[in-house]
Image (cartoon, grey):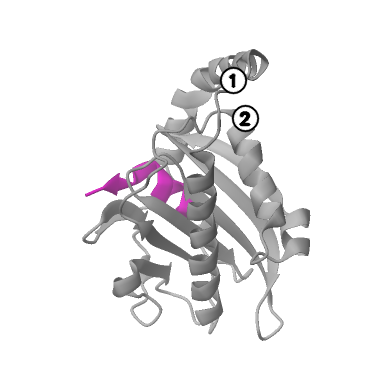
Amino acid sequence: MKHNRKWAVVCGILCLALLGGCTQQETTTDETQQQTQETQETQDETQQDTAQTESAVEWETQVYEDDQLRYEIPASWVKNEEYSYPDMMFTFFCSQDTTSDTPSNVNIQVLSLDNQSKDMDYADPEIQEQYHEFLLSADDIPQEAAKNGVYTTEQIGDTWVYMLSFPRTAEDGTIAQQTAYFPMGLDYAIAIWATDFQDGCTPNVDEVAKHICATLELK
């Protein structure tokens, strides 16, 4: 689990570096703007359905809040104090019923309280693709995992979330499916990591991560 913590921190820093670089991007061409407009029209049609889907979960929830954030997690999940680090604004959650030494988990970290790139258009397909390309070339991300992973973007409520999912091998040889969620355009820079060790965890870690994105409030 300490490996998971290090991984989240490293990738979060990379996320910030990318967003800082994007602030220097010039105005897009007319062709790109037209593509963005067409994409936005499609997104607007599905936004309401998406928001309803993400918030109408079939499991009981509880509100978690700390000094920076407020959001909902499953009622059957708990904060793991051993693997949470308040000084790093890093919080680790897993099912309270787990008996595994490496349980499926979701963790969330506030990477910065001052997001300098919050006003960018994260619906822009060009920015979305630039972010993907950055992840594929970043030295601190396992190249094979990133290249074989699945990169997606989704508007959850009013927030665009960029996601990269790929298999990871733990130190004990256990293979887990890990997905990074980056809610974009917020006052804070945030990374959410969902790690599935195939232990039958309920709800599914990706459902939990998306519900956090859907209910996320900044203080």
Q: Choose between 87 and 211: the one closer to the eye.
A: 87
What's the residue type where badge 1 is placed? Thr
Discs 1, 2 touching: Cβ within 8 Å: yes
Q: Main secondary structure of the magenta part?
A: helix
Q: Could you say where residue 118 lies in the image, as x and y percent from the top left?
A: 39, 39
- Is residue 207 shown to the viewer in this render? no
Please, what secondary structure does the residue beneath circle 2 have? Answer: helix
Question: On the image, which quarter does residue 153 sit in?
Answer: top right
Report the side of 188 relative to 41 (left or right). left
Mark 1–mark 2 Cα distance, whole angstroms, equals: 6 Å
Q: Which residue is mark 1?
A: 36
Q: Amino acid at mark 2?
A: Pro
Q: Mark number for residue 125? A: 2
Magenta span of residues: 208-219
Q: Residue at x 70, y 64 (%)?
A: 167
Q: Is residue 115 above or below residue 83?
A: above
